[in-house]
């Protein structure tokens, strides 16, 4: 279980309050008006923002003072998820070893992960030679290799077309089911939430609310969400 | 509360900044302690101060005055070779001073091309030594810089304004009042201050074209007090005076100059609707041709007379060339090991202290640092034995402000784009340094290294303080050959120096961009 215990998250002068629990293995969408603090919430879980108050716990273990790289967290950002000077295999291989000194068994693992996302032939290419969808797949191959318990998505597929975005979301769901990861996904599109998330965290008015069932919330939105959804 | 997460430690950068500050301020303190304030300034010291200020004012006014006409012509004309000429305007920055001096001598000297022409018509030959020679050389170096600064001002006038002016049918006078005069009022003071500050600490030019009681700069007086009289107290007193001057001028220049002429897009051509009269066209053509000749003729002279001189090079010159390559290589390594950690630390927001240390180099004078190092080293070791490492170190510190200007923006970009991703992948430390930071910075590292290598290769400054007769860098060797009136051999060695400087810059700059991905 991921537990945010009476947290206050500081992002510059902005403070977001969060006191909630998320079940292990759940897939959640984080929705809310823009500027409400959706990214702030997952950046705090990833360890990029300070907590003036409260604690973050995973399975009872306190993460609050761990640096980002040592948390059980993999994260995909809005853009810049790949290093342009590294090959696809190297970009994915970073999920196993940050210094890229891979054993032959680990090389095979990388190759498997790339095959899993359908890019076995492109391992030696660099990002500039690939399409946006292919780049997203490499980032997901790396997530697969990282084997972290929590996967955070900060709208990494926002620049893709609708069909391609759906394809990537389905791939995320498959990978999460395989690895048993807990997924938190920032989204401004309620359709994304309905597609893969059984629960939704609504972020509005300086507060991240506890998870609610997706369908129920979206069918019958509270006023703050209603204004946003239109 | 989680401690602040950073992909690499800022400590080495802070250490490098501390080292630079200690070097500059420590040598300054050593000089100040040694200065004999009680004795006061002699008449010759006041003369040096007067000459330093006079030549700097004349050089600044002449360079900037000519640059306004040239920049205006470049801003409103498009012609074949325009972008090549603008690139050439950047070259004097890495051109060894002694090479330019030789070129200027063969065009403007007593036996130069113009003098020969004058004598053919029964006139007196030109006299280049003295105030006007010093100013001529300073204009040769700073007219291009001033032109780039002012051209940048012209290019920053939005295209819409020119369209609006054309729409209003603005004549030349209205154009001047509406667009050009306000821009120049903003840009010219900065250009004047920058050129003035550069000319204040002129040493090599004054050493070769000045001299004597009527044409000695303070830097040159420091050298003479040190070298001829071995009067450390007087050298220190003059150093303190020089420091007040350069520090003050650098402060003013940083205040009033809002760009550095290194901006991109200088070869962009704006569509203009004014200045289409035959007179305007003719005047602009005269500016451009005149400036191109002024820059290209001396360089061609070095190449022409140097080619035959190349055959006269003796073992001493080759030895000096090897020495220079080693000093430049060492200086480049020192520079990078100072500048890279500092750039990384600045990029992570630890700016104040570190940027101040970087800027100190602009105010410091190489001869003052050299004098200070001599005073510090003298009691414990033989300073002359350390001539080459000291030269490499001082050259690196002098190149540091420029290197930081090149490295910091890209370091910020790398931290911003890849800092969090690297942290989330647990790449902090070594993996980030080797896999992300250095590969992403390669083009900028190459450019900065190229500048540092070329500047060090061509430097004729602190080495003159420390060198004994057995040791010489190539610029010093050229100077010694000139002093011995072996002009052919000097020209050959100068050509070799030119090739080495430009070659070092080209190789390092190209190496940085080779196979680099966007």
Image: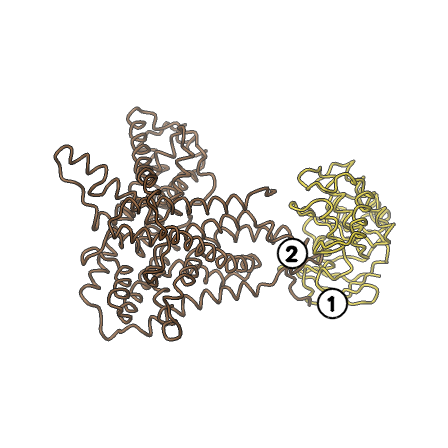
Chain colours: A yellow, B brown
Viewer-proximal residue, A77 or B455?
B455
Which one is nearer the viewer's eye here, A33 or B105? Answer: B105
Disc count in the image?
A: 2
Chain where mark 2 sits:
B
Residue positioned most to the left: B122
Q: Of residues A219 and B212, which is closer to you in this image?
A: B212
Which residue occupies the extreme top position in the image? B278
Q: Is residue B237 left or right of residue A50?
A: left
Q: Chain of mark 1?
A: A
Q: Position of residue A99 (x, y in %)?
A: 70, 56
Residue A95, image x and y in percent?
A: 75, 53
Query: As drawn, is B337 to the left or to the right of B489?
Result: right
In percent of width and height, residue B155 lies at 42, 38
- Where residue B44 sits, quadrant-wise, is bottom left
**Residue wearing tag 1:** A54
- As measured in the structure, the alpha-carbon distance from the residue carrying label 1 to the one carrying label 2 is 31 Å
Residue B455 sits above or below residue B354 on the image: above
Neighbourhood count class around disc 1 (C-alpha, 10 Å): few under 14, some 14–19, many 20 upward: some
Does B147 sit left or right of B114 as displayed? right
Work out which quarter of the rendered image holds the C terminus of chain A and state it: top right
Label 1 in the same subunit as label 2: no
- Relative vertical location of residue B116 with respect to residue B397 in this rendering, above or below: above
Q: Position of residue A127 (x, y in %)?
A: 68, 42
At numbered mark 1, what does the secondary structure look like: helix, strand or loop?
Answer: strand
Q: Residue at x 39, y 53 (%)?
A: B319
Quick one: A188 or A206, which is closer to the camera? A188
Secondary structure under tag 2 reads: helix
Q: Quadrant of residue A88?
A: top right
- The circle drawn on residue B432 is 2
Residue B364 lies in quadrant: bottom left
* Mark in the foreground, 1 or 2: 2
């Amino acid at each position: 279980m991921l537990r945010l215990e009476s947290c206050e998250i500081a992002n510059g002068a902005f403070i977001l309050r969060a006191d909630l629990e998320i079940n292990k293995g759940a897939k959640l969408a984080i929705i809310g008006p823009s500027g409400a603090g959706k990214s702030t919430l997952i950046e705090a879980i990833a360890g990029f923002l300070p907590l003036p108050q409260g604690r973050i716990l995973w399975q009872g273990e306190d993460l609050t003072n761990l640096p980002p790289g040592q948390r059980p967290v993999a994260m995909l950002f809005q853009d810049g998820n790949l290093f342009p000077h590294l090959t696809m295999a190297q970009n994915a291989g970073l999920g196993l070893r940050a210094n890229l000194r891979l054993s032959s068994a680990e090389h095979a693992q990388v190759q498997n992960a790339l095959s899993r996302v359908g890019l076995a032939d492109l391992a030696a290419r660099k990002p500039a030679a690939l399409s946006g969808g292919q780049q997203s797949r490499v980032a997901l191959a790396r997530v697969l290799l990282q084997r972290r318990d929590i996967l955070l998505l900060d709208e990494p597929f926002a620049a893709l077309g609708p069909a391609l975005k759906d394809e990537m979301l389905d791939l995320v769901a498959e990978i999460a089911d395989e690895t048993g990861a807990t997924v938190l996904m920032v989204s401004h599109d309620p359709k994304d939430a309905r597609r893969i998330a059984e629960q939704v965290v609504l972020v509005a008015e300086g507060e991240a609310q506890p998870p609610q069932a997706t369908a129920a919330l979206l069918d019958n939105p509270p006023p703050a969400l209603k204004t946003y959804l239109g | 509360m989680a401690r602040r997460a950073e992909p690499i430690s800022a400590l080495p950068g802070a250490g490098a900044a501390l080292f630079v500050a200690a070097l500059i301020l420590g040598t300054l303190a050593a000089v100040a302690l040694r200065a004999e304030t009680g004795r006061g300034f002699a008449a010759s010291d006041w003369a040096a101060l007067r000459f330093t200020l006079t030549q700097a004012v004349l050089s600044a006014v002449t360079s900037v005055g000519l640059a306004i006409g040239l920049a205006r012509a470049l801003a409103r004309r498009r012609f074949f070779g325009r972008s090549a000429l603008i690139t050439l305007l950047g070259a004097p920055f890495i051109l060894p001073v002694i090479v330019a001096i030789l070129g200027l001598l063969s065009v403007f000297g007593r036996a130069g091309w113009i003098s020969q022409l004058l004598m053919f018509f029964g006139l007196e030959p030109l006299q280049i030594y003295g105030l006007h020679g010093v100013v001529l050389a300073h204009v040769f170096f700073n007219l291009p810089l001033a032109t780039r600064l002012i051209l940048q001002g012209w290019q920053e006038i939005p295209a819409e304004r020119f369209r609006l002016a054309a729409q209003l049918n603005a004549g030349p006078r209205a154009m001047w009042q509406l667009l050009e005069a306000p821009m120049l009022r903003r840009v010219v003071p900065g250009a004047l201050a920058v050129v003035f500050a550069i000319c204040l600490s002129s040493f090599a030019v004054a050493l070769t074209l000045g001299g004597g009681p009527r044409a000695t700069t303070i830097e040159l007086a420091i050298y003479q007090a040190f070298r001829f009289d071995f009067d450390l107290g007087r050298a220190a007193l003059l150093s303190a005076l020089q420091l007040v001057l350069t520090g003050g001028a650098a402060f003013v220049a940083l205040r009033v100059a809002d760009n550095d002429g290194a901006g991109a897009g200088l070869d962009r051509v704006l569509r203009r609707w004014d200045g289409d009269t035959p007179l305007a066209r003719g005047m602009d053509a005269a500016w451009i041709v005149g400036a191109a000749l002024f820059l290209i003729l001396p360089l061609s002279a070095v190449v022409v007379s140097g080619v035959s001189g190349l055959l006269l090079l003796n073992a001493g010159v080759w030895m000096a060339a090897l020495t220079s390559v080693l000093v430049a290589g060492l200086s480049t390594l020192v520079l990078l090991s100072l500048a890279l950690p500092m750039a990384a630390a600045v990029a992570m927001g630890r700016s104040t202290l570190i940027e101040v240390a970087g800027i100190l180099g602009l105010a410091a004078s190489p001869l003052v640092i050299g004098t200070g190092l001599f005073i510090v080293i003298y009691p414990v070791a033989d300073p002359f034995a350390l001539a080459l490492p000291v030269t490499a170190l001082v050259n690196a510190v002098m190149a540091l402000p420029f290197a930081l200007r090149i490295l910091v923006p890209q370091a910020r970009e790398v931290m911003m784009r890849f800092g969090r991703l690297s942290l989330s992948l647990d790449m902090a430390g070594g993996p980030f340094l080797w896999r992300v930071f250095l590969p992403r910075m390669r083009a900028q590292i190459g450019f900065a290294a190229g500048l540092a290598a070329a500047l060090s290769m061509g430097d004729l400054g602190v080495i003159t303080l420390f060198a004994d007769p057995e040791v010489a860098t190539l610029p010093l060797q050229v100077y010694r050959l000139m002093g011995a009136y072996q002009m052919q051999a000097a020209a050959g060695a100068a050509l070799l120096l030119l090739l080495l400087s430009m070659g070092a810059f080209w190789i390092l700059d190209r190496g940085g961009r080779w196979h680099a991905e966007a």
